[in-house]
Each structure stands twice: as C-alpha cells, then as structure tokens.
Image: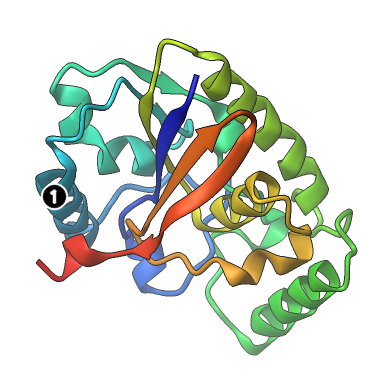
Amino acid sequence: MPKTLYIIRHGETELNARGIVQGRGINSDLNDTGRAQAESFYEMYKDVPFDHIYTSSLKRTHQTVKRFIESGLPWTQLSGLDELAWGIWEGKEGSEVSISAFRDMVERWQAGEYTAKFEGGESPEEVEIRLKEAMHTIISATSEQTVLVCMHGRAMRLLLCVLMNKPLAEMADFPHQNTTLYKLSYTDGVFDIIDFNNTDHLSS
C-alpha cells in the first residue's frame, strides 16, 4: 500500500544551542526554542490525517511531537531511530581537539569508511542496520497510509541515504535544522522525496 512519510528532526535542546554533540547516550530535553519550534510544526501540520507517530526512544523526539501524541494518535517508540552514538565525545564541550576529531571522522565516512567510529560509539554501518529494522516496522504496517516520524540529525541523514539508495558517504546532501521536514512518498517499494528540508513552519 502507498504511504506518505513526514520525517522530522527533533526541536532544539540546550546542548544543540551550545554546539555540544548529544548522540544516542544523551537524553536531553527541548529548550524554550525547541518547544516553540515543536508548537509551530504542530500548528502547520495538525490537520494532516496521520495514522501513526513513530519516534526514537529519546525524549527530545517525544517532546517535539507531544501535541500530536496528546491528540490521541497511536505512538510507537523505535530505538532503531535513535541518534548515532558518538561515544567518548557525547556531552563534551567543543574544543579544537573535538572539532578536529569530528572533522576527521566525517571525512573518513565521506571516503567510504562506514565502519569507522569513535570509542564507545557507533559506525554508520551499524546505524544503517537498525534504521532498516525500524523502517521495516513502519512500512510493514499496511493499514497506515500517513505517518509522522521524529528522529535525529545524523541518523536522519543516514536514513535518507538508505531510502534514496544513495551511498552513506553522501549524507551531507541532506541538511537538517531542528524540526526540518522531509516528506516522502512510498509506492511499490520506491521512496521519493516530495518535500526537501522544509522549514516553512519556522517562518510563519
């Protein structure tokens, strides 16, 4: 059955505002800006006939779609949608050392080293596996035609590569502000992006 997926990144947290990497191991709350972003998204899309909401297991995604959940829509948490784990760098203040480490790691990923990861963290290849499991759950729910998915920036970039059959090295092709929307259609096993990095709700 054809589906329409609204895939959004969570709203801003205080660590986002401070430029500190959160990752899978940091379960932070939205800040005031993030809550306002979430409210703006709700106001613009509250009349979309969503059949189900899927979020990661981290509360910043739950809080972003809280108004939709409170409206009584079915809601499922899928840990497969969690953010990539950044290991030893999660929650650390930005520094020349950390900036250099992240730049080097991203360059390795862009060069096709999909098994590369920080100590205690995850590689793109590992995240891809759990993202595919989560998407199988979502796509297998044949009675659901329109779904809302709330997840995380790096994981979203990887997911979009997977869904569009692009190499993971091209993850940077998908920008991801807080609460940005990627709207996709799914028909006969093929995904198409029909709304790319939409943040109109933030300027309304």
Specify few, some or many for label 1: CA neighbours under 10 Å numbering under 14, 14-19, or 20 or more.
few
Answer left or right for 34 relative to 164. Answer: left
Residue depicted at 60% across the width and 52% down the height = 160
Residue farthest along the bottom direction in this orientation: 96
Residue 24 or 69: which is nearer the viewer?
69
Could one spot residue 25 in this view of the protein? Answer: no
What secondary structure is marked by label 1? helix
| x and y percentages locating residue 26 in the rendered image | 51, 48
The residue under label 1 is: 44
When the figure is inspected, residue 32 is found, relative to residue 26, above or below; the finding is below
Location of residue 104 with respect to 143 vertically, above or below: below
- Viewport quadrant of the C terminus: bottom left
Residue at 23 percent across and 19 percent down: it is 73
Q: Estimate the x, y position of residue 176 in percent, counting from the top left.
A: 45, 65
For this view, does 184 lie left or right of residue 79?
left
Counting from the top left corner in percent of width and height, residue 142 is at 49, 12
Q: Residue furthest front?
A: 188
Q: Hey, which quadrant is residue 63 in on the image? A: top left
Nearer to me, 184 or 13: 184
Residue at horizontal 62 percent and vertical 47 percent from the top: 159
Q: Position of residue 35 (x, y in %)?
A: 18, 52
User: What is the three-letter code of the residue carrying label 1?
Assistant: Met
In this view, 31 is above or below 61: below
Residue drawn at x 73%, y 57% as measured from the top left = 166
Q: Is residue 161 above or below residue 69?
A: below
